[in-house]
Image (spheres, helix red, strand yellow):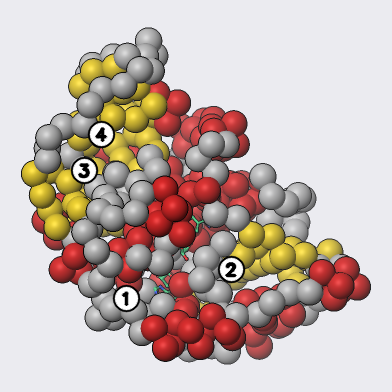
Amino acid sequence: MQKVVIHSPGGYDKLCLEQHPAPEMKDDSVRVKIAFAGINYADITVRWGIYESAKKFIGWPITPGFEFSGVVLESTNDQFQAGDEVFGITLFGGYSSEIVVPAHQLYKKPNSLSFSEAAAFPAVFMTAYHALFQNIVVRPGMKVMIHSAAGGVGSSLVQLCKQAKLDVTGVVGRSDKVAIVKELGADHVIDKQTQDLWQQARSICPEGFDIILDANGVETLGDSYKNLRPTGKLVCYGFHTMLPKQGGKINWLKLAINFLKTPRFSPLKMTTDNKSVVTFNLSFLFDRMDLLGEAMQAMLPMLERQEIKVAKVTEYLASDVGKAHADLESGKTVGKLVLKF
Ligand SMILES: NC(=O)c1ccc[n+]([C@@H]2O[C@H](COP(=O)([O-])OP(=O)(O)OC[C@H]3O[C@@H](n4cnc5c(N)ncnc54)[C@H](OP(=O)(O)O)[C@@H]3O)[C@@H](O)[C@H]2O)c1
């Protein structure tokens, strides 16, 4: 079998497509021949050696990848049989042509989804679902701001918010993303390339937002908090603006400065402001399959009814994994990127 292996942290040249023996079968597990593996922004930070759960649970060498789709080769669990079309999640190891995973991390692929769409679905939609419905209370009519709204998680958040009847303001970094976010159902879109983000935000929602979903980190976190109304929730789930957009290498000085500039929130001030900061990282929640499974069980019918859809998917050959990382790193992509095995 083939897999992408990173032996030490660094640039795109660290992503090595290698031949390895097939993984051994285990109890209550399923062997899947992978068709596509989903690519997530976190995979880039795994390659850089700064992703905490990768360091904690795997170390080096590591094969990135949280999600995949494919066909069952063999199963020691009654619910799956050879030939079943499936998709699933994994705590790393997804960038492979074959994988063995516990049966509870696997789902039957809906007929309405292609294999590439199925590989693109779980991580971003589970993140969006967990952020909105397992961390905070949402009520119809609430005003929500979603940063990076055309991206993988962002496009999932826009759709889930509209399903919950929220008023959505999507924020994008490039004008060519505006139409995509409108098409996903956003009520307002702020284009940071041509507009002043916070001036626009105040004109759309002068009283402040009920919820702001922010994975930018240092660039917007402070202003996101300021632009909440009392009772507002800032959901902080990533920090990508402290990282480079090109070249594939970390600028450690910039990273250290941005780390120091990242706002710290005081519980004393949050209490009198009546505002809260909520954070999470799903890769540390793989032992909470009650939550992750609940998210998937809630979303699969929505997917079948086409109330939500996988946003635009761009396919790359496994041998072009470096190009895929460079593209996602650039901040220019929309929707999801997947690797074909
Ligand atoms: N906590 C969790 O459990 C969890 C789970 C999944 C993902 N995440 C986080 O969610 C965020 C989105 O992940 P994703 O996989 O869906 O990626 P993505 O949103 O498809 O791509 C990242 C987007 O972030 C924006 N961006 C701003 N500054 C950037 C920079 N310096 N480098 C790269 N992108 C930059 C760009 O959009 P605009 O310019 O349009 O803003 C870019 O398109 C990431 O921060 C990721 O780590 C967290």
Does mark 1 have its CB less than 8 Å from ligand 1?
Answer: yes
* Label 1 element class: loop
Q: Does the image show residue 298?
A: no
Q: Tell me which residue sits at (71%, 82%) in the image.
A: 202
Depth check: give the residue in front, 67 or 2: 2
Q: Tell me which residue sits at (38%, 18%) in the image.
A: 28
Q: Does the image show residue 129?
A: yes
What amino acid type should be assigned to the residue bearing mark 4? Answer: Ile
Depth check: give the residue in front, 30 or 336: 30
Mark 4 highlights which residue? Answer: 99
* Label 3 element class: loop
Mark 3 highlights which residue? Answer: 96
What amino acid type should be assigned to the residue bearing mark 1? Answer: Ser
Q: Tell me which residue sits at (38%, 40%) in the image.
A: 90
Q: Where is residue 296 in the image (x, y as percent from the top left)?
A: 51, 35
Q: Nearer the viewer, mark 1 or mark 3?
A: 3
Mark nearer the N terminus (2 vs 3): 3
